[in-house]
Image: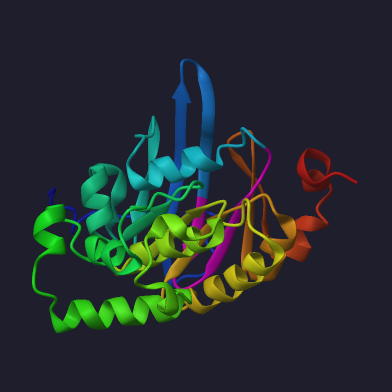
Amino acid sequence: MKNIGTASYAKPENMVSDSGVILYVEKVSVSFDGFNALSDLSLCVDEGSLHCIIGPNGAGKTTLLDIITGKTKPTSGRVVLGQNLVLTELSEWQIARVGIGRKFQKPTVFENLTLDENLELAFACDKGVRKTLFAKKTPALRRATDETLETIGLTAERRRPAGLLSHGQKQWLEIGMLLMQSPRVLLLDEPAAGMTPHELEVSVALLKSLAGRHTVVVIEHDMEFVRAIAQRVTVLHEGRVLAEGSMDFVQNDPRVVEVYLGA
């Protein structure tokens, strides 16, 4: 791993506070074949917060997550975790190791394995599947599995194959798999998509319970869901920050109404 302990950082103009900020995106731009997906974008996320990113299709939301997780490298700018850990200098696996966990829109769980086994694999993500499944369970692993199942509300389902879960339950299991890796920041891409009203209520309670213990960044199109969970909202448009603040603030911004929310 690169020596990144001495990296300096100039605070973005739109920083929320002078302390307690865990994730900085500093003047990031990225282009694909001449198309500017992100243009000089800067934002910050407070540690322990529940931060939502919204905007129309093509605004750059998923590209931003790709930049943070190292899947895509920016043309210019950088992303900093904490005070001096420059994520844009690291590979994808290094970024995952330092505490950035990402859940994609479609759940990706091991459907033939039980919930316990899915969580155990996530806990021991650097080991082979057979070695992990047949290894002796340590007290730490059992404790982490029990606590995670309780957090995601699936303790009663722990012996079931994951393939038998509902869509919402699979989403919660995947969040649990990320929690098994003790992430500092959770990046969730449209976690409310395809859920029933009851599953949405459970998801709201789950994400609220995670805030504080973890920093949660959510990309979402369901505005009622965003209103229920968000402490801060960033609106992207054409690869730039259009507005930022509370949900009430951005919802009443005429520019946001015009390009995204509508009348």
* Left or right relative to 84: residue 140: left
Magenta region: which residues? Answer: 43-56
Q: Which of 63 and 5 is in front in this view?
A: 63
Residue 100 lies in the magenta stretch:
no
**Residue at left 36%, top 35%?**
72
Q: Residue 36 location, x and y as percent?
A: 53, 25
Instruction: From the image, give the main secondary structure of the stretch colored magenta.
Output: strand
45 is within the stretch colored magenta: yes
Asked if residue 14 shows in the view, the reply is: no
Residue drawn at point x = 18 percent, y = 81 percent: 140
Q: Which residue is farthest top?
A: 33
Q: Does residue 29 show up?
A: yes
Seen from the viewer's position, the closer of residues 253 and 96 is 96
Give residue 10's position: percent from left, percent from top.
39, 54
Judge from the rendering whether residue 160 lies leftward or rightward of residue 6; answer left or right. Answer: right
Q: Position of residue 145 (x, y in %)?
A: 29, 76
Left or right: 174 with respect to 203? Answer: left
Q: Up-down: is 242 above or below 118? A: above
